[in-house]
Amino acid sequence: MVSNRVQLRWRIIGAHAFIIVFLIVTLFPLLMVFSISFRAGNLAVGSIIPENFSLEHWKLALEIPYIDDNGNEVKPLFPVLTWLWNSIKVGAISSLLVVLLSTTCAYAFARMKFRFKSGLLNTLLVLQMFPAVLALVAIYTILDFLGSYLPALGLDSHWGLILVYLGGIGMHIWTIRGYFENIPDTMEESALIDGASPFQAFILILLPVSYPILAVVFILSFIFNFSEYPVASVLLQSADKITLPVGLSFFLRDGNFLWGDFAAAAILSGLPITIVFLLCQRFLVSGLTSGGVKG
């Protein structure tokens, strides 16, 4: 009995030690980025605790001019806040549309019977195996053609980029479909017996119990669309329309590596994702762990 207690105690100590080491290894790069953003100058090397503490990089990231040690006014080189707003707008709108389209498509695959349903589902799954970068030339050509008729959906437009992001809903359709299939059909059948239409049963019965999985899809879509770089870097060209991940590359160009400014802007880019995650955290946990409705 005593030896079992000793073994259990050592196992607990070992588990705690592993967790502590894992957190240190995971958080160390983030701490270094924080340190660089508060360090005077644009050097990437130095101690974790800045020796010369400075807010110059954060002022530039927030587009606030400041006076340097020589009495000269330093103005922001890049519109970081504009880029941040572009990322938030593109990420939020595209994620909402992804939830809307994937939810309705998943409902059709989960509740309706039609020909080639299984083949369409498998096709959606196979298409998701190929990243959008592989079709970047085709995407560029399509948007260039659309832009000649509908400039709002052409190149160098946020709506054109959102349209491209909507092509990645296949995996979300599979995710929501699996959740819908675990919800008893009797809930909707009872609503239909009471006189509700299929659309009312979908809106008033099925969606309210599906908030967790919808939150999961929204968060995953927002994180991807907010931080996506390759497609956005090709489709967006104007300095006032590019997203923040594309704009961050401007800090590291032409051999002039502005590491401090880059670090401050990079931390700023993580704030919207953190806020969205915290707001939807309880839905996220239940959506990832629950298979449907119980009871």
Image: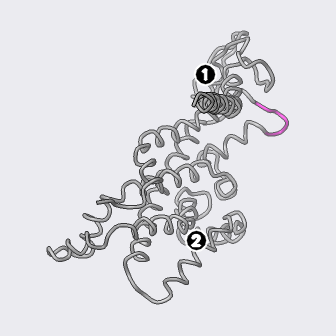
User: How far from the left and from the top, in percent, is residue 207?
Assistant: 32, 62
Instruction: Say how the picture is coloured.
Output: one colour
Which of these two is toward me, 21 or 195? 21
> Mark 2 and mark 1: span between their CA atoms?
41 Å
> Which amino acid, mark 2?
Leu
Task: Name the spot of residue 246 as percent of width and height, x first.
Answer: 67, 46
Dot 2 or dot 1: first in sequence order is: 1
Q: Residues within 10 Å of mark 2 (few under 14, many from 20)?
A: some
Q: Quadrant of the C terminus?
A: bottom left
Q: Is residue 72 left or right of residue 165?
A: right
Q: Start and end of the magenta stretch?
A: 253-258
Residue 258 in the image: above or below residue 107: above
Mark 1 highlights which residue? Answer: 65
Identity of the residue drawn at 52% across and 68% down: 150
Measured along the vertical axis of the image, is residue 229 above or below residue 292?
above
The image quadrant of residue 187 is: bottom left
Is label 1 in a helix, a strand or a loop?
loop
Give the label on residue 146, or none: 2
Is 187 on the left-hand or right-hand side of 25?
left
Element marked by disc 2: helix
**What label sits on residue 272 in the rendered view?**
none
* Image coords of residue 35 (percent x, y): 69, 22
Three-letter amino acid code of the residue under disc 1: Pro
Are dots 2 and 1 in contact, CB under 8 Å? no
Whether residue 77 is visible to the viewer of this picture, yes or no, is: no
